[in-house]
Amino acid sequence: MLKLGILGNGTVGSGVVELVRKNAEYIKRRSGTEVVISKILVKDMDKHINNHNEEIITNNIQDVYSEDVDIVVEAMGGLHPAYEYIKSFLQQKKHVVTANKDVVAKYGRELAVLAEENNVSLRFEASVAGGIPILKPLQECLAGNDIKYLMAILNGTTNFILSKMYNESMKYEEALKIAQQLGFAEANPDSDVLGYDSARKLAILSSISYDEKVDWEDIGVQGITEIDDIDILCAKELNCTIKLLATSIKKEDGIYASVRPVLVPIYGYFGKIESEFNGILLEGDAVGQMFFCGKGAGKLPTASAVLGDIFDVIENKKQRSMLIGNKKAILKSKLSEKAKWLLRIKCQNTEEILSRVKESFKACESFENKDWLQNEAAMVVEAVNEEYIDGVVKELKLLPGVEHIKKLIKVDNI
Ligand code: NAP
Ligand code: HSE
């Protein structure tokens, strides 16, 4: 018999309990051992009164320590005390499976080393892209490849919000509220909407892919809070949609890494990824392009990834420690390649400003006669690199009549 201790009984924790119970027979047949849930840790006991697992629910971590569990599933979220608990269980030679990208992005390497020293496993497939198997394929099946880049939708909440705004003209606040009710959002949804959650996941993926330590705080991050209905209308005019894309590209002199809203074609890889689904496009030198997609958030999809990790622990599969790279990566957040950009310039003198913009870019296509553009010029320009467009934007901002400028990158080939 194998005993599980579950830290957290929210969306993920309760999903793991449900899946373990539902598939108990199958799990026993497949793993050769009965898996039982011994203790579930929560914060506020009052929330769990009349829960059918009441007798094993506790708000005292000592109850979990004294239960002598074999595997601990950490699904509490946040940095503290999750980090301290994981550390302590690894030191007690307990295997740990976690869904917590905050902890993995910050302390992943330290904890992976600690796990190795104690001859136990630390696994965190659920911490990136929910139910999509991506860390294991990167570490195992694709280990023979030099990964050139990763482009991904890594946050279910923001993808859900952007899908609702695009497909149903729903207001941002309403869509966020539904995403929270459905259990997709973080306890503090700022993590989702400001792009930090995507940045943490990109850091984990990139560290594994490039064998260098990518710190999420060094990634250039822009969230979706500034996306409005005019951006959506512009996107529709261009046969595009807007996605929060997390991108990292290996370059000679470092790694370009960014999280930002991007205009993508509606029929491309990412245009079709709706709602809480995530998608990851990567290129390996041997395998070429590969695209992974599936549910990136939610109770059972995430529990699926946790269960996969539990199976691996039971089967005692040895795997190379994740985040093994210790060399700190040099990160760049400005794109050095030629790219197209949507520019929106809030101003009274639109004709005058438009002609100034045309002087600055070889290619410039403006939106003409749109009644939804009030005191605003909007156009797609092509710039040799991001530094160039930022320089032009800085100069334009100084012109009389210019109130506000917004830029969004438009990527055509994905
Ligand atoms: P959640 O619904 O907010 O649940 C958190 C659970 O942890 C609650 O049961 C809470 O107890 C408990 N908890 C929080 N702080 C605690 C503390 N200090 N001591 C004891 N218990 C504590 O969160 P979630 O959505 O399940 O997410 C959990 C983790 O999985 C996070 O790291 C998240 O990023 C990650 N994740 C989530 C999803 C998703 O779709 N939601 C997907 C992938 C990964 P109470 O019930 O008493 O408040
Ligand atoms: N809040 C996260 C998201 C949960 O929306 O993607 C899954 O990691």
Image (cartoon, grey):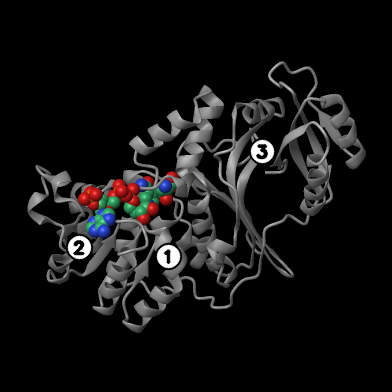
Say whether disc 3 or disc 1 marks the residue closer to the N-terminus. 1
Circle 3 is placed at which residue position? 263
For mark 2, does the 10 Å Cα neighbourhood hold few (<14), some (14 to 19), or many (20 or more) residues?
many
Disc 2 secondary structure class:
strand
Q: Which mark is residue 360?
A: none
Disc 3 secondary structure class:
strand
- Nearest the camera: 311 or 301? 301
Rendering coords of residue 203 (x, y %):
53, 62
Rendering coords of residue 409 (x, y %):
71, 43
Disc 1 secondary structure class:
helix
User: What residue type is disc 1 on?
Assistant: Val
Rendering coords of residue 47 (x, y %):
17, 44
Say whether disc 3 or disc 2 marks the residue closer to the N-terminus. 2
Circle 2 is placed at which residue position? 4
- Nearest the camera: 203 or 121? 203
Q: Single out the residue that lies furthest toward the front.
A: 400
- Judged left or right of residue 38, residue 299 is right
Q: Residue at x 67, y 58 (%)?
A: 333
User: What residue type is disc 2 on?
Assistant: Leu
Q: Quadrant of residue 251?
A: bottom right
Q: Is residue 16 visible?
A: no
Front: mark 1 or 2: 1
Q: Residue at x 71, y 16 (%)?
A: 371
Q: Residue at x 53, y 56 (%)?
A: 199
